[in-house]
């Protein structure tokens, strides 16, 4: 369901992706990889991070750590389990909200918007990260991939969130850092979209999709909530966004 105009839409809910939209998850993973490599007495934390990027397992799967250890001849079950525990602890410790996230969410709540999170993370990980960042209690709805059996860009995870909030797609503004997995599917089902350029690490993504708005800081959302100005504020991400784009290791 594509829109011809967003100028007259009444936004009731603001929905967010989680990782790299509310906090820098990539840097947290780097920190966790560094802790593991130090624990093993090795020096190539960037190489360990690359194992998570291979696509052999899930981006969060511990098996990536196992393969890394086996390839370097340092695997034992006991040390492997120590590294998995270290990975989870250090990753969570390193997560902090981006600047202005807490203030922005508090203000959106005061303005009467309901707030939701739509994430591919498992429910346990999502809760832990949102609790660590003091964001959990600010959201009315949390929908994770394991709750729906699908991941973005599947529309099902978005529809489940809208159902829980009892709103239609055109009553939601969706904010995410991935053009392919966040912005494109949200636009296709009729949501207004805001591209979180400040958190985009997806350097290899197709960049042809355009959001309705671009955020160089999460607080930029307030510039676009006045429906009277929605049409005039609409712009191309290629013209207005300041890309952060700190890439994954080569």
Image (cartoon, rainbow, N blue to C red):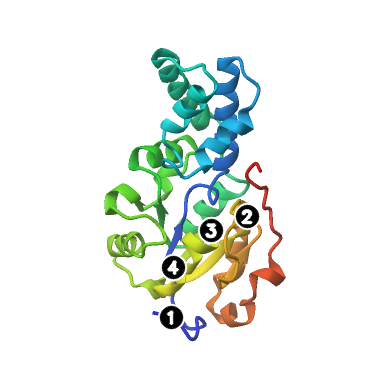
Q: Position of residue 5 (x, y in %)?
A: 50, 85
Quarter of the C terminus within the rendering: top right
Q: Please indicate, yes or no, whether residue 88 appears anywhere in the rendered image.
A: no
**Label 2: how many Cα within 10 Å (few below 14, some 14–19, many 20+):** few
**Label 4: how many Cα within 10 Å (few below 14, some 14–19, many 20+):** many
**Label 1: how many Cα within 10 Å (few below 14, some 14–19, many 20+):** few
Q: Please indicate, yes or no, whether residue 146 appears anywhere in the rendered image.
A: yes
Spatial CA distance of label 4 from label 3 is: 11 Å
Identify the secondary structure beneath mark 4: helix
Residue for badge 4: 186
Q: Residue at x 55, y 44 (%)?
A: 23
Residue for badge 3: 178
Front in this rendered view, residue 56 or 2 = 56
Spatial CA distance of label 2 from label 4 is: 20 Å
Q: Residue at x 65, y 41 (%)?
A: 249
Q: Are marks 2 and 1 in contact (CB under 8 Å)?
A: no
Quarter of the image holding residue 24?
A: top right
Q: Is residue 233 above or below residue 4?
A: above
Spatial CA distance of label 3 from label 2 is: 10 Å
User: Of callouts 2 and 4, which one flags the residue occurring earlier in the amino acid sequence?
Assistant: 4
Residue for badge 1: 2
Residue for badge 2: 203
Identify the secondary structure beneath mark 2: loop
Q: Nearer the viewer, mark 2 or mark 4?
A: 2
Q: Position of residue 136 (x, y in %)?
A: 41, 43
């Amino acid at each position: 369901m594509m829109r011809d105009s967003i100028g007259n839409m009444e936004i009731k809910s603001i929905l967010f992706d989680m990782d790299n939209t509310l906090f820098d998850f990539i840097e947290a993973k780097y920190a966790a990889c560094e802790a593991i490599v130090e624990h093993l007495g090795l020096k190539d934390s960037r190489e360990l991070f690359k194992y998570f990027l291979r696509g052999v397992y899930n981006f969060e799967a511990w098996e990536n750590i196992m393969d890394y250890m086996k390839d370097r001849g340092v695997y034992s079950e006991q040390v492997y389990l120590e590294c998995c525990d270290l990975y989870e602890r250090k990753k969570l410790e390193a997560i902090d909200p981006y600047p202005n996230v807490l203030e922005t969410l508090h203000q959106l709540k005061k303005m009467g918007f309901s707030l939701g999170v739509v994430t591919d993370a498992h429910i346990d990980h999502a809760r832990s990260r949102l609790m660590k960042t003091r964001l959990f209690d600010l959201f009315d709805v949390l929908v994770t991939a394991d709750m729906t059996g699908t991941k973005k860009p599947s529309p099902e995870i978005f529809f489940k969130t809208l159902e829980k909030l009892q709103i239609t797609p055109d009553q939601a503004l969706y904010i995410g850092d991935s053009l392919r997995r966040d912005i494109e599917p949200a636009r296709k089902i009729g949501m207004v979209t805001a591209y979180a350029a400040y958190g985009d690490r997806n350097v290899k993504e197709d960049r042809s999709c355009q959001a309705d708005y671009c955020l160089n800081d999460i607080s930029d959302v307030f510039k676009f909530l006045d429906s009277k100005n929605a049409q005039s504020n609409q712009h191309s991400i290629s013209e207005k966004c300041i890309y952060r784009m700190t890439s994954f290791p080569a």
